[in-house]
């Protein structure tokens, strides 16, 4: 791209050999978890010592110039240190350090050469290692910059080591206008792996048309590098972003039972796209990609080392690859349930001894909430913390009031809708699934709300609400029932809004389609004082809650946050330059999402993974999320206000707070969420309007338009022809689009993720799967007699098995945890935002509003009139409190989907 000016100023050089190992530090400026082939035994005891030369870069002309010192900060990494103590590459990298040639830097002018009209030649210099302090290594180089070089706009970096380095920042000292900082926070591959030099821009943001002339070409070439050519298998050190379908969840080469359909790219299974890895295709199914022990993600999408070593990937890997296999060694009967409820309590009170845990010493550090040492024992125990729901009220899970309350202030507040049409009716083909009319009738509703109002009044006054999983689950009932140890129904639950703004459950409907020569079976269950009906009602709630758990995990959580966000990340890196202001606004909201999604494909949503083995609807779980994507997902209803309106939970009202009037005034998720949404939108508005003064700037921004086009036509390509996609023509359009993405990655994800252990950690309160049919579905005389004799046993048999429960509890504990280095919304300012006084002031207003929100939520949780978040034994609603300490807290809104 450029020719570089370099001048070497040499001093005396002295080489000497050290014939004993010499470890100069507690770390190394590289990171690698993969074994290197360069190891040679003879190099282990030889080290080269050298007094470095001084290498300066100067201009070749004789005009006035300024001396500039570059300071490069590289983070030490524990894994890199451990892997670099031996091997040829370690010795060669020592030589590079001692020769003063660890890194090669080139400063790039923002201006063109007026004589040629071309980019000015960069000025280059080698950086030498100088100091190590607080886990960071400093490298320095000296430049002599001519006065007519112009403003420095970028630095090119070449890593002369044989291992990658993590660059924290580069600071240029001695410039006329003060120091210039380049915030890198990026892995730089060895030049022996990737010969392309890395480019780092200043913290100043530019729209494409405002890009300084000297940076235009480098801006375009950097984007081309990130897009790649769509060929070959990706290497771990690469930074290429491309699209592919979800064709790596199954293993058809292992067994036909392990094959899974390709999700995405077809009308039958529409789906968002994932990041392309380029792995070989399967032999038995050329449309499916082979699986591997690790899944490629672009290098800078990987977890930070703190997150890597002390939290997310480490703990989740520990759970998946050590704890769960150990559990399987002691629970050999995969179908064995809990004989008594006291046996369930022992999971929390005493734990279970797991012999094989002792050999994994790291587990007590990685999973301290779960793995406990047993005094005077060769074993360790798997013991779970008692969830806050049960700590406050041990029997809350059994009560109808809690069943209803959690639809508004629980783990899945996204499913409840207002009843707007009557009678309730399925849209499925009646020739296949039986009569479409619901068995929940007007007469049944009137019986349940008798004394409050008539059915017509309840419908007109919007007092009836429903959670309807009938049409999404019913097509899978026959297939799921062929899986040993599980069952499924289509289901609905209907509620009535009382005068105190709490919900009263009226009915649960369970439906089985025609199968095995039997006609459609449907039954409605309601609360009752009569013993048999009361127990049937409890069992019906258990089945419905299993469906709600599955839908929550697969749709409200995985699909609508993790899965649908990945295309936004890919498009942003492919189409928006690193110096584009919208890229810099969105970047913190994308951190670590691709890495956690890749980990999910490895062991959570894959064939026979945790989701398939322990959630409804079993092996069809992710396939079902594809159906939900096709039927239900639309970008224009993903913002919180639009979502509430689409579900009939709010109407536009300019005289109400947030411009919305809630149908249920005491709706904790919506009440707190709208305050958070307003804060987000105000911040995005301030930011966007600073860069986009009018519609012409939005429409002329080629990168921005390419970004939005690619999200619609590639990332969500199966929905590219839908009419509801928002246009991107005005600043207001951009504000709504960006605010929606920010909300999904922060508020939406926090609301459905970080309460998982608090609300579902006691699994009878939210079972993830139901294992037996209702006792009154085609009952036998013996089966019905068993139910009448001891109905509690029927409930225990319906709940998850011991193996399923312990697996799920282990994973939920990890998924509900905040990392020690969690980045909470509004807590820390990004360097690029901090560099501009106006953006900095806007961020400080945003951060201030979030601190106010903390106090508002605390006050609401103490308000006696808000019965859905305050009362005896009631868990306060804190899922949208912006800040939190680390661990399982049930609060805190991170910037991004990082777990």
Image (cartoon, rainbow, N blue to C red):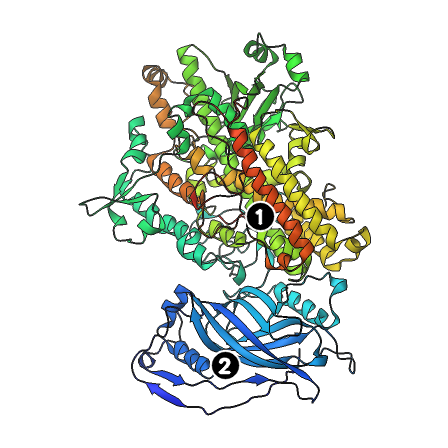
Q: First in sequence: mark 1 or mark 2?
A: 2
Q: Is residue 308 above or below residue 440?
A: below
Question: What residue lies at 34% left-to-right and 81% top-to-bottom?
Answer: 43
Q: At numbered mark 1, what does the secondary structure look like: helix, strand or loop?
A: loop
- The image quarter in which residue 703 lies: bottom right
Query: Is label 1 in contact with label 2 (beta carbons under 8 Å)?
Result: no
Res. 269 visible in picture: no
Question: What residue lies at 52% left-to-right and 36% top-to-bottom?
Answer: 552
Q: Name the spot of residue 66 as percent of width and height, x first.
A: 64, 81
Res. 472 visible in picture: yes
Q: In the image, 383: left or right of 555?
A: left
Quadrant where the N terminus sits is bottom right
Q: Name the spot of residue 100 as percent of width and height, x first.
A: 48, 82
- The image quarter in which residue 461 lies: top right
Look at mark 1 in the image and give the residue it sits on: 826
The residue carrying pointer 1 sits among few (fewer than 14), some (14 to 19) or many (20 or more) residues within 10 Å by Cα, namely: many
- Please tell me the numbered disc located at residue 101: 2
Name of the residue lying farthest toward the top? 451
Question: What residue lies at 64% left-to-right and 66% top-to-bottom?
Answer: 202
Nearer to me, 733 or 601: 733
Q: Is residue 108 above or below residue 456?
A: below
- The image quarter in which residue 115 lies: bottom right
Q: Name the spot of residue 185 as percent of width and height, x first.
A: 54, 63
Nearer to me, 221 or 892: 892
Q: At numbered mark 2, what does the secondary structure look like: helix, strand or loop?
A: loop
Q: In the image, 725: left or right of 359?
A: right
Q: Is residue 44 above or below residue 382?
A: below
The residue carrying pointer 2 sits among few (fewer than 14), some (14 to 19) or many (20 or more) residues within 10 Å by Cα, namely: many
Q: Name the spot of residue 556 as percent of width and height, x first.
A: 55, 38
């Amino acid at each position: 791209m450029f020719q570089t000016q370099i001048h070497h100023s040499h001093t005396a050089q002295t080489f000497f050999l050290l014939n004993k190992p010499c470890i100069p530090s507690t770390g190394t400026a590289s990171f690698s978890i993969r074994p290197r082939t360069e190891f040679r035994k003879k190099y282990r005891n030889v080290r080269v010592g050298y007094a470095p030369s001084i290498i300066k870069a100067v201009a070749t002309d004789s005009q006035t110039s300024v001396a500039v010192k570059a300071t490069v900060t590289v983070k030490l990494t524990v894994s890199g240190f451990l892997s670099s103590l031996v091997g040829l590459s370690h010795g060669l990298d020592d030589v590079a350090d001692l020769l003063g040639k660890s890194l090669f830097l080139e400063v790039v002018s923002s201006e063109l050469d007026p004589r040629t009209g071309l980019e000015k030649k960069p000025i280059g210099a080698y950086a030498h290692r100088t100091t190590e302090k607080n886990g960071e290594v400093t490298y320095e180089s000296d430049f002599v910059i001519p006065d007519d070089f112009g403003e420095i706009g970028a630095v090119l970096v070449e890593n002369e080591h044989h291992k990658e380095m993590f660059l924290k920042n580069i600071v240029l000292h001695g410039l006329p206008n003060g120091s210039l900082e380049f915030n890198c926070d990026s892995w730089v591959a060895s030049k022996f792996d990737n010969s392309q030099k890395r480019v780092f821009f200043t913290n100043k943001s530019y729209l494409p048309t405002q890009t300084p002339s000297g940076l235009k070409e480098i801006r375009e070439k950097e984007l081309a590098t990130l897009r790649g050519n769509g060929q070959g298998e990706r290497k771990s050190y690469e930074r290429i972003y491309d699209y592919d379908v979800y064709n790596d969840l199954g293993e058809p080469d292992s067994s036909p039972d392990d094959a899974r359909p390709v999700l995405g790219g077809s009308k039958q299974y529409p789906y968002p796209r994932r990041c392309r890895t380029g792995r070989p295709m399967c032999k038995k199914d050329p449309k499916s990609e082979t699986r591997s022990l690790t899944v490629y993600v672009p290098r800078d999408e990987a977890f930070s080392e703190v997150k890597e070593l002390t939290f997310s990937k480490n703990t989740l890997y520990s759970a998946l690859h050590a704890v769960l296999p150990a559990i399987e060694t002691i629970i050999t009967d995969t179908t064995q349930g809990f004989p008594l409820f006291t046996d369930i309590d022992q999971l929390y009170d005493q734990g279970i001894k797991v012999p094989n845990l002792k050999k994994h010493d790291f587990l007590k550090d990685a999973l301290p909430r779960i793995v406990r040492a047993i005094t005077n024992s060769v074993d360790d125990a798997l013991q779970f913390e008692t969830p806050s729901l049960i700590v406050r009220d041990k029997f809350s899970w059994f009560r109808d009031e809690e069943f209803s309350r959690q639809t508004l202030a629980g783990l899945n507040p996204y499913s409840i809708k207002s009843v707007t049409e009557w009678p309730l009716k399925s849209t499925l083909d009646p020739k296949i699934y039986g009569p479409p009319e619901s068995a929940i009738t007007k007469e049944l509703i009137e019986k349940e709300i008798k004394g409050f109002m008539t059915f017509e009044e309840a419908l007109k006054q919007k007092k009836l609400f429903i959670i309807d999983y009938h049409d999404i689950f019913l097509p899978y009932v026959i297939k799921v029932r062929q899986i040993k140890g599980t069952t499924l129904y289509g289901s609905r639950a209907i509620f009535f809004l009382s005068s105190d703004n709490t919900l009263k459950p009226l009915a649960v409907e369970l439906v089985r389609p025609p199968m095995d020569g039997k006609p459609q079976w449907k039954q409605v269950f309601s609360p009752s004082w009569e013993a048999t009906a009361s127990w049937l009602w409890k069992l019906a709630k258990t089945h419905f809650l299993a469906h709600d758990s599955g839908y929550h995990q697969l749709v409200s959580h995985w699909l609508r946050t993790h899965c649908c966000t990945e295309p936004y990340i890919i498009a942003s890196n492919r189409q928006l330059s690193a110096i584009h202001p919208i890229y810099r606004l969105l970047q913190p909201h994308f951190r670590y999402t691709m890495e956690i999604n890749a980990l999910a494909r490895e062991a959570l949503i894959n064939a026979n993974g945790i989701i398939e083995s322990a959630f409804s609807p079993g092996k069809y779980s992710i396939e079902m999320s594809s159906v939900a994507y096709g039927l239900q997902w639309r970008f224009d209803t993903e913002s919180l206000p639009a979502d509430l309106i689409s579900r009939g939970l709010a109407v536009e009202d300019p005289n109400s707070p947030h411009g919305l009037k809630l149908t249920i005034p005491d709706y904790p998720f919506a009440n707190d969420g709208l305050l958070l949404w307003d804060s987000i939108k105000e911040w995005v508005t301030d930011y966007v309007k600073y860069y986009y003064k009018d519609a012409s700037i939005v429409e002329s921004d080629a990168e921005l338009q390419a970004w939005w086009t690619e999200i619609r036509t590639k990332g969500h390509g199966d929905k590219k022809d839908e009419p509801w996609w928002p246009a991107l023509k005005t600043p207001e359009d951009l504000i709504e689009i960006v605010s929606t993405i920010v909300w999904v990655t922060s508020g939406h994800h926090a609301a459905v993720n970080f309460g998982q252990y608090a609300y579902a950690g006691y699994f009878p309160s939210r079972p993830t799967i139901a294992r037996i049919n209702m006792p009154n579905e085609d009952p036998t005389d013996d089966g019905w007699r068993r139910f009448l004799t001891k109905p509690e046993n029927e409930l225990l048999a319906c709940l998850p098995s011991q193996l399923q429960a312990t697996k799920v509890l282990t994973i939920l504990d990890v998924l509900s945890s905040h990392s020690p280095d969690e980045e909470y919304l509004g807590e820390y300012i990004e360097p690029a935002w901090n560099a501009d006084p106006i953006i900095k002031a806007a961020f400080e207003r945003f951060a201030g509003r979030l601190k106010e929100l903390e106090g508002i939520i605390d006050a609401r949780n103490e308000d006696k009139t808000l019965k859905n978040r305050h009362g005896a034994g009631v868990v306060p609603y804190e899922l949208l409190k912006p800040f939190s300490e680390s661990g399982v807290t049930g609060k805190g809104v991170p910037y991004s989907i990082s777990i």
